[in-house]
Image (cartoon, grey):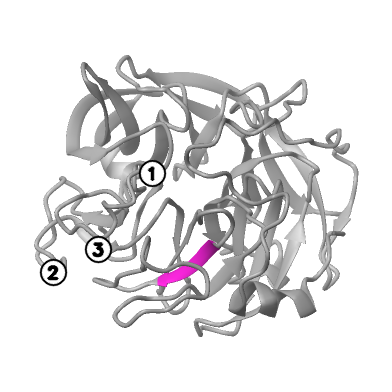
Amino acid sequence: MPAGMLSGVVLALVLATQVSEGRACRNDTAATPAPTTTAPPPAATEVFTTIDGVRFLVEPVITNLEIPWAVAFAPDGRLFVTERPGRVRIIDVATRSSALALTLDDVYREGEAGLLGLTLDPQFAQTRLVYLYYSARLPNGAVNRVVRYREAGSHLGERAVLLDGIPAAQIHDGGRIKFGPDGLLYITAGDAANSNLPQDLGSLAGKILRINPDGTTPRDNPFSSPLYSYGHRNPQGLDWHPVSGDLWAVEHGNVGNDELNAIDVGANYGWPRIEGTQSMSGMRSPIGIYNPALAPSGIAFYRGDRFPRFTNNLFVAALRGTELLRVILDGTSRRVASAEFLLEARFGRLRDVISGPDGYLYLATNNRDGRGSPAPADDRILRIVPAP
């Protein structure tokens, strides 16, 4: 498919179930997929054009990373990056150099598990607090944890465990963490390869969680626990609409049926009782359904001023799809007006996307995760900038 508007196709993606094709997700018990075929990376001078005429370039910011999973900017312009084997790096975007800030010595790095999410305190300039989500190795297995560190001199210290005992496995660990407009910390937790857990309100797995910055449970959480919503399979992306404030999330479906959801407090999103276009009383059906699978990961609403036509568009980093999905909503409603695939098979597997403070979009590739075909400089942080 060329990098153009899905126009007539998007309604089928949003409203109908399609037959799964070659890009469909593997079954949970299947072997690791063969590496994704990736075209040679384009030169930084190649101009890409959206269907509505936005022209842009993609340039490297930093290269030779090892499976970068999450990226976040500090107020001073430094870029914090997690690497799944257990490292946090701090990137100087101006000099395109990196400093090693932390290496975890108890990370469980089997399959999809490892050091995953990262976010900075909303008052980072004053507090210097950094929050991480990672899979921790135990004598008899593993758990996922949310931990907090304090940054000083480009090093992380003063560790505190905020939330422990989130079920972990080699697949379906969720892992995205972000602060919401309410100042609370939101966390995506996968079902840890156990489909019984998302409907179990006594388990943290298969949920979107919400905690206070100190790890305690907010008083207005719906179940008097960290649970915010439930019935999720493997959610990996979170962001809030800049105008409406609605929380949006993406998650991996079972053999296709990847989902785009608007998240409401206390709502049940159905897994494993319903998926795709199925419905059941008391359960939410997705706003967007994607077949064949995209394997969506990080998402970001565009908040900058370099690309006026991107304002409030939602961008989705796709792993199996090896593309960047641009979703245009109908104003502040919960309806998809149109969508467009960008950068298909040009940079390989995309793990995260954020809207940078400089007005550019930043992407993280994941071609060294065992399922991609790494280029010599992979993995990379890339930047989308306007073309001259």
Instruction: Estimate the x, y position of residue 147 in percent, counting from the top left.
Output: 25, 34
In the displayed structure, does residue 364 sit left or right of residue 266?
A: right
Residue 241 lies, in percent from the top left, at 47, 71
User: Which amino acid does the dot numbered 3 rest on?
Assistant: Tyr
Task: Tell whether 278 sits left or right of 306.
Answer: left
Q: Which amino acid does label 2 sit on?
A: Asp
Identified at 42% across, 79% down, the residue is 279
Residue 168, horizontal then vertical, whole percent: 31, 35
Position of residue 211 in the picture relative to residue 273 (left or right): left
Q: What residue type is labelled 1?
A: Thr
Q: Is residue 315 above or below residue 161?
A: below
Q: Residue at x 76, y 57 (%)?
A: 342
Among the two numbered marks 2 and 3 on one chain, the one whose residue lies closer to the N terminus: 2
Identify the mark at residue 262; answer none if there is no mark. none
**Alpha carbon of mark 2 to alpha carbon of mark 3: how far?**
10 Å
Q: What stretch is highlighted in magenta?
A: 258-262
Q: Is residue 185 left or right of residue 201?
A: right
Residue 178: percent from the left, percent from the top?
A: 37, 52
On the image, numbered disc 3 is attached to which residue? 228
Q: Residue at x 88, y 36 (%)?
A: 43
Residue 268 visible: yes
- Labels 2 and 1: the sequence-earlier one: 1
Classed neighbour count for the residue bearing mark 2: other residues with Cα under 10 Å, few (<14), some (14–19), many (≥20): few
Cα gap from disc 2 to disc 1, whole angstroms: 23 Å
Dot in front, 2 or 1: 2
Task: Say which element carries label 1.
Answer: strand
Which residue corresponds to the image point at 36% horizontal and 66% vertical from the top-left? 273
The kind of secondary structure element at disc 2 is loop
User: Label 1 near label 2: C-beta < 8 Å?
Assistant: no
Q: How far apart are marks 3 and 1 (CA)?
A: 19 Å
Query: For the C terminus, which image quadrant?
Result: bottom right
Which quadrant would the N terminus be assigned to in this image?
bottom right
